[in-house]
Every structure is written in C-alpha cells, then in structure tokens.
Image (cartoon, grey):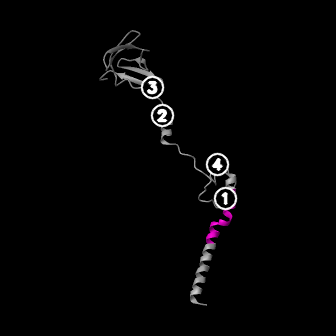
C-alpha cells in the first residue's frame, strides 16, 4: 500500500472514532424519544425538570423550541398598575397656611390661621380646611387629620 493511502485511511478511521464518541456522549440516538416524553409530562407553564414531571433519566436538551417564555409586561403597563394601587396623599397645610395665634377658651379653644394667598381664618375643633379636619388645638400648635394622615401647624418660633 502506498503511504498516502495509509495516511488517508488512518485519518478517516480517526475521524470515524471521534464521530462515534461524540454521538455516544450526546446521545442523539435516544434523545428524541426522551424529548417527547418530556413534552407529554409537562404543562405549558413548566419547564423540563420542574414541578409537574415524573422522574425521567435523560439528558435535557439545552434548547426547547416548543416551550415559550411568558410575555414580559411593558413599562407602560407597570407604571399604570403602580399608579392605581398607590395611596393618594393629601397636600400638606404648612406651605399655604401659617398659625398666627391660639385663642384660649373655657371649653372651646380657637386658632387664628393666616392664608398666604391672603386673609385670615378663625377655626375651632371639628372645622375643616380642604380635606383636613381640626382634631385638637393646643397652646402652641393645631393638629389636623384626614383618614390615616396627620399634619401639624405650629406657632412660629416654638
């Protein structure tokens, strides 16, 4: 035999052995059978190897073209949902109103409140300013409440 023919046969034999080992390691011959068993035992939402599966001895395929991921919510949908569930916080009184003084009374204390847009107002307990209701009038502060929120106006300098 010629040396070139021997080299060619040795190369083909080496290539055949490498191909045989590669096919045996990746189990291409039995993979399709196991692959369809996986599809029968899983639901659309599960992935092979998770919850609703019987135990199968197989090598899982790296890519499964039949299982699609769940759609991802867009940023507009997420922003809209977060706005609907967020609580509405009422606007604070302090930037628009200033407590000018407290008028002590025997049973009904009153407070003088200056509105920064102009004017003053005399309030007592249970009066309202917007959504805020007067809860108590103390010598140096007035406490307002609306739902679970509270706001306090204090005398300047105290």
- Relative placement, left or right, of 79 versus 103 is right
In space, the residues marked 4 and 2 are separated at their CA atoms by: 32 Å
- Foreground mark, 3 or 2, reads 2
Within 10 angstroms of label 4, few (less than 14), some, or many (20 or more) residues? few
Mark 3 secondary-structure assignment: strand
**Chain part drawn in magenta:** 21-36
Could one spot residue 57 in this view of the protein?
A: no
**x and y percentages locating residue 129 in the rendered image:** 40, 18
Q: Nearer the viewer, mark 4 or mark 3?
A: 4
- Looking at the image, is mark 1 or mark 3 earlier in the sequence? 1
* Sooner in the amino-acid sequence: mark 4 or mark 2: 4
Give the CA distance from mark 1 to mark 3: 59 Å
Picture coordinates of residue 90 (x, y %)?
Answer: 43, 26
Residue assigned mark 1: 35
Q: Which residue is mark 2?
A: 83
Secondary structure of residue under mark 1 = helix
Q: Residue at x 62, y 60 (%)?
A: 61
Q: Which residue is mark 3?
A: 149
Task: Classify residue 28 as left or right of residue 146.
Answer: right
């Amino acid at each position: 035999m010629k040396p070139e023919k021997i080299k060619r046969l040795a190369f083909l034999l080496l290539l055949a052995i490498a191909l045989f080992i590669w096919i045996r390691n990746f189990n291409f011959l039995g993979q399709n059978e196991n692959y369809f068993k996986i599809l029968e035992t899983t639901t659309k939402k599960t992935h092979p190897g998770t919850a609703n599966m019987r135990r199968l001895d197989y090598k899982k395929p790296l890519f499964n073209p039949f299982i699609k991921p769940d759609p991802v919510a867009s940023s507009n949908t997420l922003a809209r949902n977060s706005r609907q569930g967020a609580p509405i916080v009422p606007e604070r009184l302090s930037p628009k109103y200033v407590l000018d003084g407290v008028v002590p009374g025997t049973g009904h204390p009153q407070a003088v409140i200056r509105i920064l847009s102009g004017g003053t107002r005399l309030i007592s307990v249970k009066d309202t300013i917007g959504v805020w209701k007067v809860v108590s009038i103390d010598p140096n502060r007035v406490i307002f409440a609306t739902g679970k929120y509270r706001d306090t106006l204090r005398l300047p300098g105290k």
